[in-house]
Image: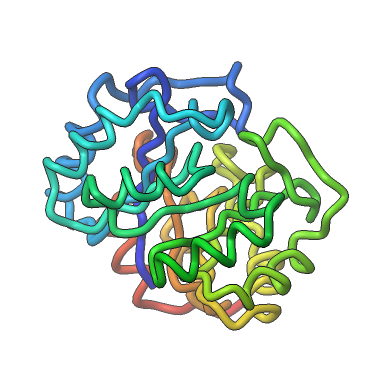
Amino acid sequence: MQIWPAIDIRGGRCVRLVQGDYDQETVYGFNPADMAVRFQADGATGLHLVDLDGARDGDNPNQKQIAEVVNEVNVPCQLGGGIRNEKTIRDYLDLGLSRLIVGTKALTDAAWLVEMCGKYPGKLLVAIDARDGRVSTDGWKKTSATNAVDLAQKISANAIAGIIYTDIAKDGMLGGPNITAMQEMVAAVDVPVIASGGVTTAEDVARLTTVGVEGCVVGRALYEGHLTLQNAMVAARKEVSN
């Protein structure tokens, strides 16, 4: 299972939010590229980037910082946030990003998702972010009546590269991931699933290995020293009993 250290960018800075709340922001660095270099030095095999401004507003104000990250490291970088048209997809892939994560647009325009997956095979993941099992969009500002697992089953037929599944209630809370929700998602689809939200300890990582996710995103726990990247990577190769 792969560990994806998260670098969330807002206003050009490296930050973390609590449960996606833009009013609960902690700044962990003023240069995301410096954080990327640090994670790579610690052994990261890939980086998970999020443009929080883009996710909320649908534009791409942090493209300069994202380009700097890609240029400073030599590990694959995947990016989500504000990717809602083909031009943005082309621009970001041209910057050297390995994969892109589409959310709001993929969930509201199925035909567009099919078209983009056909044009950019293996390059597009879909973010499914849920509150109490219901899908949220627009930077988590809106929660729909759509069931996350039902949606995943529908879109997994569209040649997507995988699903990044976030339990919003767990995100940034340092309380452990929603193992049951991740297990249900893995069982429901035939595409890789990356777990996100709440990963805090090495045991959390080890438990996720038992449900079959391809990887997990780790954010606040790394920044605040609750978990080291080295320990997370060791745990990703182990299993624990439930």
Tally of numbered tags: 0
Q: Can see residue 35? A: yes
Q: Is 88 displayed left or right of 74 in the figure?
A: right
Quadrant assignment, res 98 = bottom left
* Colour convention of the picture: rainbow
From the top left corner, tell me how far across and down residue 10 is, in percent. 42, 23
Q: Can see residue 207? A: no
- Judged from this view, the residue extending furthest toward the right is 145
Q: Quadrant of the C terminus?
A: bottom right
Residue 156 to residue 107: above or below: below
Q: Is 115 displayed left or right of 65 in the figure?
A: right
Viewer-nearest residue: 157 or 210: 157
From the top left corner, tell me how far across and down residue 214 is, in percent. 45, 73
From the top left corner, tell me how far across and down residue 111 is, in percent. 66, 61
Residue 187 to residue 132: above or below: below
Q: Is 64 displayed left or right of 198 in the figure?
A: left
Going 50% across and 37% down the picture, which residue do you hit?
Answer: 82
Going 66% across and 68% down the picture, which residue do you hit?
Answer: 155
Q: In which quarter of the image is the N terminus?
A: bottom left
Quadrant assignment, res 185 = bottom right
Going 53% across and 79% down the picture, which residue do you hit?
Answer: 212
Viewer-nearest residue: 30 or 178: 30
Going 58% across and 67% down the picture, which residue do you hit?
Answer: 114
Q: Is 112 displayed left or right of 235 in the figure?
A: right
From the top left corner, tell me how far across and down residue 30 is, in percent. 27, 19
